[in-house]
Amino acid sequence: MPTVTDVVCPLCGCLCDDIRVEVEGNAVKKVRGACAVGRAKILGHGRLKSPLLREGDELKECSYEEAIKRAAEILAAARRPLLYGWSCTVCETHKVGILLAEVLGGVIDNTASVCHGPTVQAVQGVGLPTCTLGEVKNRADLVIFWGANPVEAHGNHMRRYSYLTKGWFRPEGKKDRKLVVVDVRESRTARMADIFIRVEPNKDYLVLAALRAIVNGFADVVPESVGGVPKERLVELAEMMKTAQFGIIFFGMGLTQSRYKHNNIEQAISLVRDLYAFTKFAIMPMRGHYNVTGFNQVCTWQTGFPFAVDLARGYAWYNPGETAANDVLSRKECDAALIVASDPAAHFPAECVKHLAKIPLVVIDPYPSPTTEIADVVIPSAVCGVEAEGTAYRMDKVPLRLRKLVETEFLTDEEILERLLDEVLKIKGLQ
Amino acid sequence: MAELLIKNGIVFDPINGVKGEKMDICIKDGKVVESVSSEARVIDASGCIVMPGGVDAHTHVAGGKVNAGRLLRPEDGRKGLEPRTGVCRACSGYSVPNTFATGYRYAKMGYTFLMEPAMPPLKARHMHEELMDTPIVDKAGMPLLDNNWMTLQYAKSGDVEKLAAYIAWMINATKGYGVKIVNPGGTEAWGWRKNCGLEDPVPYFDVTPAEIIKALAEANERLSLPHSIHLHANRLGQPGNYETTLKTYDLVKGTKPSRKRQVMHATHVQFHSYGGTNWGNFESKADEIAKYVDQHEHVTIDLGAVMLGDTTTMTADGPMEYNLYLLTGRKWTNCDVELETGSGITPFLYSGKVAVNTIQWAIGMELALLVKDPWKVVLTTDHPNGGPFITYPILISLLMSRKRREEVMKEVHSVINERALLPTIERELDWYEVAVMTRGTPAKILGLHEHGKGHLGVGADADVAIYEISPEETDAGKIQKALLNAKYTIKGGEVVVKDGEVVAVPEGRTFYVDVRYEDEAVWKEMLSDLEKMFKEYYTVSLANYPVQDDYVPKPYVIKAGAAE
Amino acid sequence: MQTITLGIKEKVFEGVARVPVELDGVTPDALCGKSADEIKELKVWWGNRQEKLGDLFDVGVEGSAEKPDDVKIVCKGDFASVKRVGEGMKAGEIIVESDVGMHCGAMMSGGRILVKGNAGCWAGREMRGGELIIEGDADDYLGAAYRGEMTGMTGGRIVVKGSAGDYVGYLCSGGEIVIEGAVGILAGLGMKGGRIVIGGDAEAPGGEMTGGTLVVKGKVVDMLPSFRFEGEEEVEGVKLKKYAGDLAMGKKAKGVLYAP
C-alpha cells in the first residue's frame, strides 16, 4: 500500500508533520503517528454531499453554480455582511476571503475572537516574549501549563515539543525538566506535573498579579492566600521561575476565556517579561484549530490587523468588542453572513445564533453542522490537508504546507470563494 | 508589450556614467532598448529628472518579524488608513504598513526593488507569502545564517567547505538571496538571555563571533554568491561600539572576493558608529567609520539613518531589542527561532529633545556626507528601525540642503554642537550622488546590476523613476515633495505611477539564488549532519522544510557557484 | 445660537438587523452656520454605504451661529445604534435625548455632550478635553484608550449618573471621570494620571496602575494582592483606606487607590 510520509496533520495548532498515511484506491486507509482526533480527521467522516439551497423549511440539493450565484446575491445586497470562520482552512483561502470582505465592505473575523482573541489583545498591550516550539524542546528546563490541558486537547504536544521530548540541552527529556500545571481543576495534564497549583475559578488575574509583585520584590504586600493559593506556594513558584535556565508558560482557554480574559494574558506576559531580569523565559498560547494562527497572520499583513476587521468604509477599522463576530451578532448589526470552515451555531451564545438564523446565511464547509442546518445556502468544500494543499501556521507561527493525499470531486473553498468573488464583482458592475 | 519613449528628461544613470544629461530612454518588452518605433507611447519628461528605479538594499518589509510588528501596533496601523480604490487594495500603517501599502508607497517614491534582509530560514515560507502580496516592486530576501547550530559547529571546526555546502543548501531551501548575519553568536546566546562580544565564546558552542564572521565570509566567496556577506555587527546601539565595528571590518580584510565587489556589506552603520562609554557621554564616531571605509575596498555600508519621530524597531538581534525595551518601558515582543536565530520588536520615538536621539539623527547623515566615495554608501533608514521608508524624501532633502539641516539643528537638542559632527559639515549631495546612493551602489553591492537593476543601459529592466523637479532646484521642501510622489514610475516597462497616484499594480518578481556546491563527498557529509539536526532537534521534518515553488509564482533565478 | 435637531427616521429600524449609522463628522464645528438643506446633503456612513444625512434624519435648524461654541445639536428618537456621536468635537453642545451607540464623544477636545439615556462602549475614548455627561449607564471602556496606544484619556471630564461597565479609564493619564454607581472589572486599568471616582462597587480596581488617583466608595470585589496599605484617609467625606500600587508593575508604580 503506498504510504505518504511527513504528512502535516490538519487538526490542531500543533501541526504535527511526521504523520504517515496509507492511501489505496483514492482513499485514506491508515494513519500512523497522529493523535486519535487527528487520525479521525484524516480518515474522514460524514460529509455534505451536494450544494444546498433553502426553500422554506427545507434545504434542497442544487448545483455549485446555483448556490454560488445565490450566495453572491445575498452578500452583495447586504449593508453589513459578516464573514466569519477561517480557522480550519488554508491561508490561500484567507486571501480570497479578505479580498471578498474588502469588495463587499464587510466585517471579517475568525474564530480567534472566541478563543485566543484575548491573547492578541494582550499582545497589543504589552508585547509577547515567545519562541518557536523547538526552543522549548531543546532548552526548556521548566515547563508550565496554565489553564491548558494538552493531554486531552493537543495530543502530541508534550511528546513532540514540550515535556517528554528530548532536546540538544535536554538529552534526558522529561528528567531534565520540571513540569508545573496551574488550573482550576486537576486535569490529566495536572496529574503528570511535579507541581500542581489549583486556582479558584476566575482568580488567575489575582494570582498572576501576586506572582509579579513577588518577582518584582514586593512579596511583603502579598496576602497569605491569593485565589485559593497559599502565599508560600506562590513564593516557591516565583523562585522556580527565577532560577530556571529556560522557562516557558503555555496557556490555554482556561486563561483566555475566564474572568479578566485578556488581562489574564497581559499579566502572564508581563510576568514573563519581568522574569527577564533574572533568566530566560517565554510564553505561548496553545492555539486550537490548525490554522487559526494563519488567519491572524494573513489578515495582519493584508489589512494591518489580525481579526475583527470592519472594512465597511473600504479601509480597516479594528476594534474587538465592536467588530468581532459575536459583537455584530449580539447587537444584531449584521444583515447577512458568510461562514467558512466553522460552526458558530454550535459554539456561539444563543442570542447570537438566533440572529444568525434570522439573517440570510451562506455556509462553506466540508461537513454538515448545526450552522449548515440554519443556512440558506450551503456549499460543500474539499478538506484541506487531505484533499487540497495549502499553507497553515503552527501555534508558534511556523508555516507549513499541507499536502493533498487523495483526489476529490468537491471544489476547494478557495475555488468556491474565487467564483463567489467573481459573481459579486459582476453584480457590483466591477468586472 | 507596448513601447515607451521617455523624452527630454534629465537622466541620472550612474552605472552608465550618465550625470544629468538630457536624453531619451527607449523601452520595449519591459527592457531598455536602443530605439523604439513611431508607435511608442511618448512620455514627456522635459523639466523632469529621470533615474533608474530605486533599489532598497535593506528594508524590513516582509516576514514573521515584520508581521509581529504590525500585530503589536494597531495604533500604528490606524495611522496610515487609505480606502480601497479601483486599482489599489486597502492600506494601513505608517512604520509597519500592510504589504499592499508597502508596494504602493515604494512605487510612488520611484523604488522598484526591495531587499528584505532578515528572513528566519524556518519561517522562509512566511516571508515569501508576504512578498507575494507586496505589489509592483521586485524583491528578494536573505536568510539568517550566522547563529545556526550547523554554522556554529562548522565555524568552530574551521570547516569552510561544509559551511559552504550548508549555506548552499539553505539558500536553495529558503529561496533566498544571500548570507545575512545578525549579531553573530549573540543571538544564540540570547537563547539563554545572554549576549556576545566579538571575541566572547558563544555559550556551549565555544566559537567566537569573529570566527563565525570570518568563516561565513570565506564560505560566501567559496560559493561566489552575487552578494557578499551582509552583516549586522555585534554590539548594535551600544555607546562606544565603533571600535567593535572597525575590528569587525578588519576581520575580512584578507578575504579574497570571488567577484568584483566588496567582501562584507556592513548594514545600518549609524547604529554602529557610537563613541563614549555610556549614554551620558555618548558621541558620534562617524568620522572614524568614514575614514576606514574610504581607505579600504573590502567594505561597503548602508546608513540606517535615523529620522525623528515614532517608529517600530525590529531586528533578529534579540538582546538589543530587550535593552531598548528596558530604556523605554514600552511594549516588547521577542521570538527566538529554534536552531537558527531570534528577533525582537519594540516601538521607539526618536525625539529631537533627547540628546542621544539627536546624535543618532546626526550620525546617519554624517556617514552619508563624510564617506567621500558614494559608491560605498547606500541610503537606508534600515526601515523601520531608523525611521519608516516613507521618510526617505526627507532624508534626501536634508542631505541635499545644508540650509534645511541648519533649520532642523536649531530645533533639536543643543548637544548636537558638542558631540556630533553634522554642524561642521558643509557638503550637500547633488542629484548624481543621490542616484548613486539609491540606485547604482545598492544594485552593484547586491550584484543586481548584472541582472538589469539599478541602471538604464540597453538590456536593463525598464524600471524608471521620473521626478518633476529641475536638477537646479535647491528648495528642500520641493525636493522632498517631488521624491515622495514621482511624476511617473515605470516598472518592467509598465506605467505604474502617474502624477503621484498608483495606476497599475502588476505583481513583482521574487529574485533568488540557485547555488550549487560541487564536491559530492563534502555535500553528503553535510547532508548527514543536517539530517541528524532535523531528526533530533528541529520540530519540523526535513521533507517539509524547503520552500515549495508555489511560494514564488514569479521567480527570477540567479545561478551561482557550480550552477553558474 | 444655532440649534440643530436630528430626528432619526423609521427607515433606520426596518428589517431584522440594526445596522448602525455613524455620525462622525456631524459636530458643531462642522455644522456651524449651515442651513438645513446643506446639512441634509452631508454624507454619513450607514453600514458599507454612504447616505445623505437628510435621508436618515429629519433635520431642523433654528437660529444661526458664527462660531461652533454657539451651536447645539439635539438628537431625537432612538440613537442606541447610532455610533460616533460627537466624535472629535471641539466646541458647542450635543444633547442626545435617548440612549446612544458606541464611541460617543470619542476623541473630543472641547464642548459638551449630554446623553440622557445610556451610552454604548468607548464613550469618551481618548478624550482630550470638554465634558461628557451620561445620565444613564455607560458600557465598557468609558474614557479608555484605543487598542495598542500608550495613553487613553488625557483631559476633560466625564460624569456618569448610573453605573459603568468594564475598563473605565483604561490607560487614563489626565482628566477626571466620576461615576455615581458601580463599575465592572478593572476600573483604572493601567492608569498613569488623572482621577477616577467611583460611587458604587468595583471589581479589581486599579490593576496595573502606575499613577493617578482612583477612589472607590462602594465595595471592592477581588481586591488585588499587589497593593500596599498606607493608612486611612477621608476622601470627599468618606473614610477610606489608602493603597499604593499596583506593585505588580514594580518600582515605577506610583498610583493611589482609595477603597473601603
Image (tube, rainbow, N blue to C red):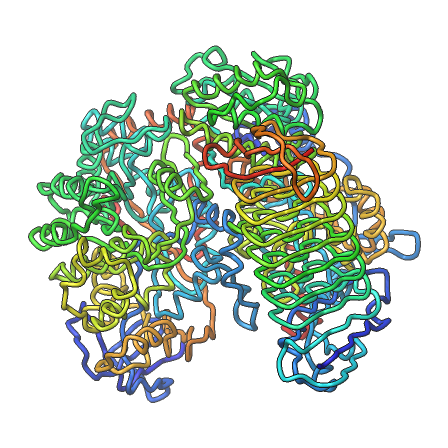
In this orientation, which residue lies closer to the viewer: A323 or A108? A323
In the rendered image, the vertical position of residue C82 relative to residue A51, given as above or below: below
In this orientation, which residue lies closer to the viewer: A333 or C208? C208
Q: Quadrant of residue C117?
A: bottom right
Position of the C terminus of chain A, as image quadrant, is: bottom right
Q: Is residue B303 left or right of residue B92?
A: left
Position of the N terminus of chain A, as image quadrant, is: top right
Q: Is residue B132 left or right of residue B467?
A: right
Residue drawn at 52 percent across, 31 percent down: C247
Name of the residue lying farthest toward the right = A57
Provide residue B435's location: percent of width, then percent of height. 23, 69
In the rendered image, the vertical position of residue C10 relative to residue B383, given as above or below: below
Provide residue A41's location: percent of width, then percent of height. 68, 33
Q: Quadrant of residue C33?
A: bottom right
Residue drawn at 48 percent across, 21 percent down: A241
Residue drawn at 21 percent across, 55 percent down: B445
In this orientation, which residue lies closer to the viewer: B210 or C134? C134
Q: Is residue B392 left or right of residue B552?
A: left
Name of the residue lying farthest toward the left = B295
Provide residue B179's location: percent of width, then percent of height. 28, 43
User: Can residue A420 be spotted in the picture?
Assistant: no
Provide residue A83's location: percent of width, then percent of height. 69, 54
Q: Is residue A140 left or right of residue B271?
A: right
Q: How many marks?
A: 0
